[in-house]
Image (spheres, rainbow, N blue to C red):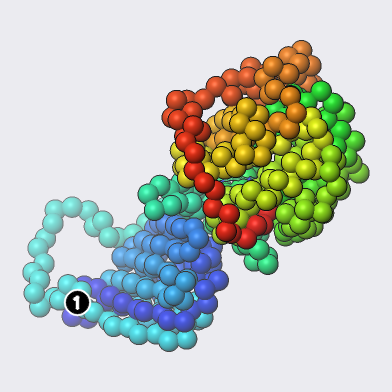
């Protein structure tokens, strides 16, 4: 060879979008491509960026293989850089073409480090490239596979095992479960984190016990969304509750959670729980009036399919379904991260429930964007979220059920808001009501 290295630059067109948006598949294919070519792997780092796209590199003793994918263009660009006589980058190329289902490819091979232009000098150092003789000391390599949820300016990344434990495209969304090192099994919908094994209790305790412990006798409860089962589990701890209707549009979320998140989904077969696989919007439209003591809206984020959930007509129907002293609680996004939606939605609640009957409370959830998450508490009658809390009863309840986040002090203090949140709530923004309405999880 007349150069130190061979550099194959490849363009893969018309790839299978699912294959090049699956970080596990891309990582495994790149690792295999390196091994087939005879390379020794040192380190592997791959990032998936929601909703589409993967960047990754396989560092080998003999340089690196790298990739960036654009599933929305069915395109992947790949660099295969090897040095030494023994590694053939074209073997990697053939394997990747096959694995990504590329219909057309273009490529070029460059010679890197032309010997004609180089002079070898003798360096007084051990032969650091001599990994071959030390191979037994490098039997494994580090895998760094990352899930990233982001908008244009902010990202949250969680390192995971690289195996996608569940992945299915339902008629509504891409449902996935990955195994993260810091937060355990994590349910994502369209690339957004819905719940994780390690911090789910914060959200589920706060969205459930704040309304149920301030209501004097909650018997009939409606959950819109909630397919993972976390809200149902918390609601069913309350002895006063006779029946819970849970309306989840996406059966795949329920199936995935039952299979892989059994602690969250633990009460999805409880006889008091009736699951309706249906659009929550339609359900409340057809629901009789004065039916529920508490309605909990455990929705996804208002982007993609769930965008239209944040719509006045839906909340008018919820209001009608509530008994005269009923309470509606919704997850109302992050005031810091989803500021526009946050401002809009509180305007909508106030129009329907009256401006003095809508309260906002906060909890701190590490895996949701910004960590600061809000819930709305909307009271149809005169129940007040703080004044009507029976402290003794709530305290006994916490002890009995060994709750991990909620306690009566947290209940009360969660309604104390930072100034910037108060400021946002005082601004009047007209809600955009033009979107389709859909509810899930
Ligand atoms: N950005 C995350 C918002 C998630 C709201 N729903 C969570 C579902 C948990 N049951």
Within 10 angstroms of label 1, few (less than 14), some, or many (20 or more) residues? some
Q: Nearer the viewer, residue 117 or 70?
A: 70
Asked if residue 34 lies left or right of residue 224, the reply is: left
Residue drawn at the location 56% of the way across and 39% of the way down? 347
Instruction: Determine whether the beta carbon of the residue marked 1 sits less than 8 angstroms from the nearest atom of ligand 1.
Output: no
* Residue 96 screen position, x and y as percent: 46, 77
Taking 282 as reference, is 372 above or below it? above
Residue 226 can be seen, yes or no:
no
On the picture, is 71 further left or further right than 313? left
Residue 330: quadrant of the picture = top right
| Residue at (79% x, 29% y) in the render | 325
Ligand 1 lies in which image quarter?
top right
Q: Residue at x 62, y 60 (%)?
A: 436
Which residue is tagged 1? 3
| Residue 395 image-quadrant placement | top right
At x 80%, y 43%, the residue is 321
Element type at marker 1?
A: strand
Left or right: 262, with 176 as reference point = right
Residue 49 spot, x, y in % from top left: 46, 58
Give residue 173's position: percent from left, percent from top: 63, 62
């Amino acid at each position: 060879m007349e150069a130190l290295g061979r550099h194959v630059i490849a363009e893969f067109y018309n790839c299978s979008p699912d294959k090049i948006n699956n970080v596990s598949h891309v990582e495994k294919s790149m690792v295999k491509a390196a091994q087939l070519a005879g390379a020794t792997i040192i380190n592997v780092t791959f990032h998936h960026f929601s909703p589409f796209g993967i960047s990754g590199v396989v560092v080998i003793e003999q340089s690196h293989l790298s990739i960036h994918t654009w599933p929305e263009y069915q395109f992947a660009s790949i660099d295969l850089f090897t040095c030494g006589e023994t590694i053939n980058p074209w073997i990697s190329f053939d394997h990747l073409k096959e694995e990504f289902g590329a219909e057309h490819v273009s490529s070029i091979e460059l010679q890197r480090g032309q010997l004609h232009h180089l002079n070898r000098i003798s360096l007084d150092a051990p032969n650091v490239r001599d990994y071959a003789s030390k191979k037994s000391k490098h039997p494994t390599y580090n895998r760094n596979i990352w899930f990233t949820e982001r908008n244009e300016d902010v990202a949250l990344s969680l390192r995971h095992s690289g195996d996608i434990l569940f992945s299915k495209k339902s008629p509504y969304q891409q449902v996935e479960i990955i195994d993260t090192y810091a937060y355990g099994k994590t349910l994502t919908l369209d690339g957004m984190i819905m719940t994780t094994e390690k911090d789910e209790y914060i959200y589920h305790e706060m969205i459930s016990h704040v309304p149920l412990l301030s209501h004097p006798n909650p018997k009939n409860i409606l959950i819109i969304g909630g397919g993972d089962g976390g809200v149902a589990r918390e609601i069913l701890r309350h002895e006063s509750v006779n029946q819970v209707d849970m309306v989840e549009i996406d059966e795949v979320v329920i199936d995935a959670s039952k299979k892989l998140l059994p602690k969250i989904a633990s009460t999805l077969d409880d006889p008091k729980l009736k699951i309706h696989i249906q659009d929550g919007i339609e359900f409340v439209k057809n629901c009789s009036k004065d039916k529920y003591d508490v309605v909990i809206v455990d929705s996804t984020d208002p982007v993609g399919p769930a965008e239209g959930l944040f719509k006045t007509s839906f909340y008018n129907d919820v209001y009608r379904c509530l008994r005269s002293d009923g309470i509606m609680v919704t997850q109302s996004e992050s005031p810091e991260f989803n500021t526009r939606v946050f401002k809009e939605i509180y305007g909508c609640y106030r129009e329907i429930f009256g401006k003095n009957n809508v309260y906002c409370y906060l909890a701190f959830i590490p895996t949701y964007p910004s960590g600061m998450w809000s819930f709305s508490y909307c009271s149809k009658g005169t129940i007040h979220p703080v004044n009507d809390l029976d402290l003794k009863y709530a305290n006994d309840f916490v002890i009995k059920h060994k709750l991990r986040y909620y306690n009566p002090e947290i209940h009360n203090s969660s309604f104390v808001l930072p100034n910037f949140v108060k400021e946002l709530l005082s601004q009047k923004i007209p809600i955009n009501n033009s979107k389709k309405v859909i509810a899930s999880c």
